[in-house]
Image (cartoon, helix red, strand yellow):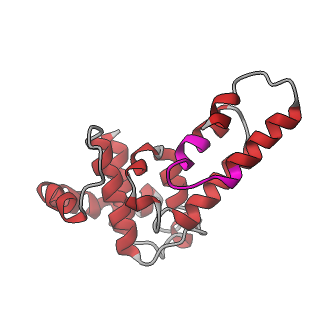
Amino acid sequence: RVCVELLPVTLPSACIYCRCCKVMVKCINAHTVSTYYTASVKYKQSAVQESCERWLQLNMVPHLSLVINLRELPFELLEKTLLSSRLFTWNEYSLFKLISHWIFLQIHPHIQMMPAHSFIMTYFQQYVSILELSATPCLQVGILGCPRQSHFYKRKRQYPTLCYCLINVMKGML
């Protein structure tokens, strides 16, 4: 946290600045990844930014999906991570669960503790018909509106279309 606060200050030595970035890279976890990523983008620190992206590719599903800090993850970074070919996940349901938790936390920013998955699914039961309607165009047009012949569609075919439809729903909500 101290390093994030030091970045905007003109430091007397480039060595301190580099050391601060190294500490940030070493200390990335579920509670700091969003803050570090945002700071790295703002202050153009590509090493920290790439480290945060890589950490998310490996740990977003097993670690970040379990903590309230998931709400701090910017949409653009969530989308970039979900579209990465290096994304680690146990199965498609884990991705669905992660995205539904993220959407729920965006809708309810006042919540202080991560709600149970069953509570979130009960909440979304009222939107099942909306998701079914939005899934139909996604299946016809292709992933994220890309034509089925595109390179993007062929490369990302392994992930469930429902997750990409949820991304489209998220874009409409934001």
Which is nearer the eye, 118 or 87? 118
In this rendering, the answer to whether 67 lies above or below 44 is below
The residue positioned 39% from the left and 74% from the top of the image is 92
Q: Which image quarter holds the C terminus? A: top left
**In the displayed structure image, the side of residue 128 where residue 86 appears, left or right:** right
Q: Is residue 54 above or below residue 5?
A: below
- Left or right, 132 with reference to 148: left
Q: Position of residue 126 (x, y in %)?
A: 11, 55
Q: How many labels sit on residues?
A: 0
Quarter of the image with the N terminus in it: top right
Q: Residue at x 37, y 61 (%)?
A: 98
**Residue nearest the observer in this picture, 14 or 104:** 14
Q: Residue furthest left?
A: 126
At a point 51% along the width and 67% down the height, the residue shown is 153
Whether residue 129 appears in this view of the structure is no
Residue 62: x %, y % from top left: 46, 68
Left or right: 151 with respect to 13? left
Q: Which residues are magenta?
A: 25-37
Left of 58 or right of it: where is 97? left
Q: Where is residue 49 drawn, in percent x and y? A: 67, 47
| Residue 173 shows up from this direction | yes
Considering only vertical position in the picture, is 30 above or below 61?
above
Does 10 sit above or below residue 119?
A: above
The verdict on residue 35 being magenta is: yes
Q: Which residue is outermost to the front?
A: 2
Q: Is residue 56 magenta?
A: no
